Amino acid sequence: MDRPTVHLHAVDSLLIILYLFAVVFIGYRAAARRKGGVDDFLLAGRTLTLPMFVATLVSTWYGGILGIGEFSYRYGISNWVVFGLPYYVFALLFALFLARRVRETNLYTIPDKLYLVYGRRTAILGAILLFILETPAAYVLMLGILVQLIFGWSLSLSVIVITFLTLIYVYTGGFRSAVWANAFEFVLMFLGFALMLLFVLVKYGGFPFIQHNVPPLHLTWHGGNSLQYIAVWFFIALWTLVDPAFYQRCYAAKDAGTAQRGILVSILFWFVFDFLTASTGLYARAVLPDLQQPMYSYLILAEHTLPIVAKGLFYIGMLATIMSTLSSLTLISAITVGKDIYGKFHEALSLQEPSRWEHNVTRYTKLGLILTGMIAVVLALSFPSVVQIWYTIGTAIIPGLIVPVVTSFIPRASMGPKSAFWAMLLGWLTSTSWLVMGFMNQASGRPLYPLGVEPMYPGLIASILVWGADRSRKLKTPLNAASR
């Protein structure tokens, strides 16, 4: 795959190097404020204020910047409909119906809630699925590609170095270090894209320039895509309702009100950042109409548009956007290993020797960081497509998680423990089997799914049917009891 050539002035290169050192330094400074204990390492002592909550959530939930650039270049403002609107909707639903409930449980993770409501078996299966769902491989790959372009290293070296730099401070300071680094990266991601939009406006003009230089379909809500295709992305956006990053930040908020308000404010910031990225994508299409690799549209536009310093800051903004997500997802995956898998198998120790249990949970979480980083590097080098990683993992895992996780926070909708386990297992296995069958039967390199149906739908239907059968039995039981 041909990649663009990046020409950086020594000043721009120095700015990027300073940024990388600054992130590590800030992470270490935050680690020095640690008070010890599981509560502090996993959730920063549950002290997140509204500004820090918003900064860490906004930056964490926006790592796929190269994919956003590609989609904007290909389909215009449809990018906003596909990658913006459905996430606003589900984030709003999370804020209105789940955020307060999540914080008030005073737990640590999603499997903790599954354990309380549905038992150990469902909690451990949920932990395994969440570990797969939160793999940061796609973000390791994107960062590796960016570093490779900037410094000219091999992809393997770029992936290993950037993963090490991202994890070193999280290993020391846990969630507190990730939050502080995220706040710094939050500022830089907005600054980078605001500078880009300012320079293209000055150089090329406003909306009339776009209107006259992009295909007409780029300015329609669908971008030429079918309604069915767009609907699939709305279902993928269900990810929001089971995303551990949302739950972790709600658990870490200083109170339930902060958790709810934080998500509402975050939606506004996502809207602004989507405006910046979508507008930049339209300018890239207008200025560079014949790109062979649209994934690099932002980078090539920067080469054509930005002067010294501004170019360095834009590249920093892109790095910050991805690194913030990488650090958070890697920590969440590590917590799944330490708290949700080790912790659940040693629940008795938490009652007999709580201090030893806490020490071991922190220790295994740190080991989980190393394990997660290694797996992510291997996957990133094995699957050189960010979209393929997202699609495969999201399609296979979300159908198994969505119903048991959401109903665990809504007592009136909850199931019996046995039904919850089978809803999770069958939802996951059905969608995964459908996915495998599609890849085993391909035409022109595209999977042919049974009945032409996307794998997510049968998985969701299987899980919902188990839930419906359980609810039906519960509704009939009082009537039967009364008739006796």
Image (cartoon, rainbow, N blue to C red):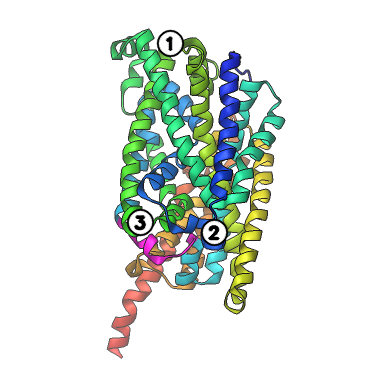
Marking on residue 287: 1
Residue located at (38% from left, 31% from top): 273
The three-letter amino acid code for the residue at tag 3 is: Ala
Which of pointers 3 and 2 indicates the residue nearer the eye? Answer: 2
The three-letter amino acid code for the residue at tag 1 is: Val
Marking on residue 99: 3
The three-letter amino acid code for the residue at tag 2 is: Lys
SS for tag 1? helix
Residue located at (35% from left, 59% from top): 255
Few, some or many residues within 10 Å of mark 1 (<14, 14–19, 20+): many
- Expressed as whole percent of the image width and height from the top left, the position of residue 321 reads 49, 34
SS for tag 3? helix
- Expressed as whole percent of the image width and height from the top left, the position of residue 289 reads 45, 11
Stretch in magenta: 97-110
Which of pointers 2 and 1 indicates the residue nearer the eye? Answer: 2
Q: Say whether residue 106 is magenta.
A: yes
Q: Is residue 263 above or below residue 471?
A: above
Q: Is residue 147 rendered to the left or right of residue 481?
A: right
Check disc 2 and report the residue beneath it.
Answer: 35
- From this viewpoint, which residue is outermost toward the bottom? 484
Q: Is residue 391 above or below residue 69?
A: below
Q: CA distance from mark 3 to mark 2?
A: 26 Å
- Expressed as whole percent of the image width and height from the top left, the position of residue 371 reads 68, 50
- Residue placed most toward the observer, 68 or 372: 372
User: Which is nearer the N-term, disc 2 or disc 1?
Assistant: 2
Q: Is residue 448 above or below residue 314?
A: below
Question: Is there CB contact under 8 Å for labels 3 and 2?
Answer: no
Count of numbered marks: 3
Marking on residue 341: none
Q: CA distance from mark 2 to mark 1?
A: 52 Å
